[in-house]
């Protein structure tokens, strides 16, 4: 059975996941890049500008917090 993919991206290879769990910085970076779009989607904020127009921006503080939590869960801290 074929694995589902999202916009052409398949699941991460097991070797990358194992290396990330072992603390390999490059593997952790690859995992973060893999989930970057999803994290951005979670961190969208609606902002009303001075011109009364609605803008949607990524809340960078929330994004960093989610990335840190993802790293902690990968490495097994906390």
Image (spheres, rainbow, N blue to C red):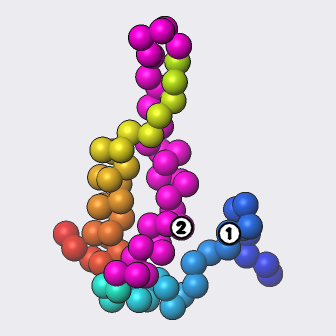
Residue located at (37% from left, 49% from top): 63
Q: CA distance from mark 2 to mark 1?
A: 8 Å
* Above or below, 22 relative to 46: below
How packed mark 1 is, by other alpha carbons closer than 10 Å (few <14, some 14-19, many 20 or more), is few
Q: Which quadrant: the C terminus?
A: bottom left
How packed mark 2 is, by other alpha carbons closer than 10 Å (few <14, some 14-19, many 20 or more), is some
Image coords of residue 19 (percent x, y): 41, 89
Image coords of residue 50 (percent x, y): 42, 11
Residue 21 in sight: no
| Residue 62 within the segment the image draws in magenta | no
As drawn, the label of residue 9 is: 1
- The extreme left residue here reads 78
| Residue 39 within the segment the image draws in magenta | yes
Residue 24 in sight: yes
* Above or below, 34 relative to 40: below
Residue located at (32% from left, 53% from top): 64
Residue located at (53% from left, 67% from top): 34
Splitting the image into 4 quarters, where does residue 3 fall? bottom right
Stretch of the chain drawn in magenta? 25-53
Asked whether the beta carbons under mark 2 and mark 1 sit within 8 Å of each other, the answer is yes
Q: Residue under circle 2?
A: 34
Give left or right: position of 7 versus 48. Answer: right
Badge 2 or badge 1: first in the primary sequence: 1
As drawn, the label of residue 21 is: none
Q: Nearer the viewer, residue 48 or 14?
A: 48
Tell me the SS state at disc 2. Answer: helix
Image coords of residue 46 (percent x, y): 47, 26
Residue located at (48% from left, 9% from top): 51
Q: Which quadrant: the N terminus?
A: bottom right
Give left or right: position of 23 versus 1. Answer: left
* Above or below, 51 relative to 67: above
């Amino acid at each position: 059975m074929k694995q589902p993919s999202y916009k052409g991206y398949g699941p991460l290879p097991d070797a990358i996941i194992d290396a990330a769990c072992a603390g390999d910085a490059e593997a952790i970076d690859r995992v973060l890049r893999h989930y970057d779009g999803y994290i951005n989607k979670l961190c969208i904020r609606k902002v009303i500008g001075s011109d009364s127009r609605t803008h949607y921006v990524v809340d960078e503080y929330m994004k960093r917090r989610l990335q840190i939590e993802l790293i902690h869960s990968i490495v097994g801290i906390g």
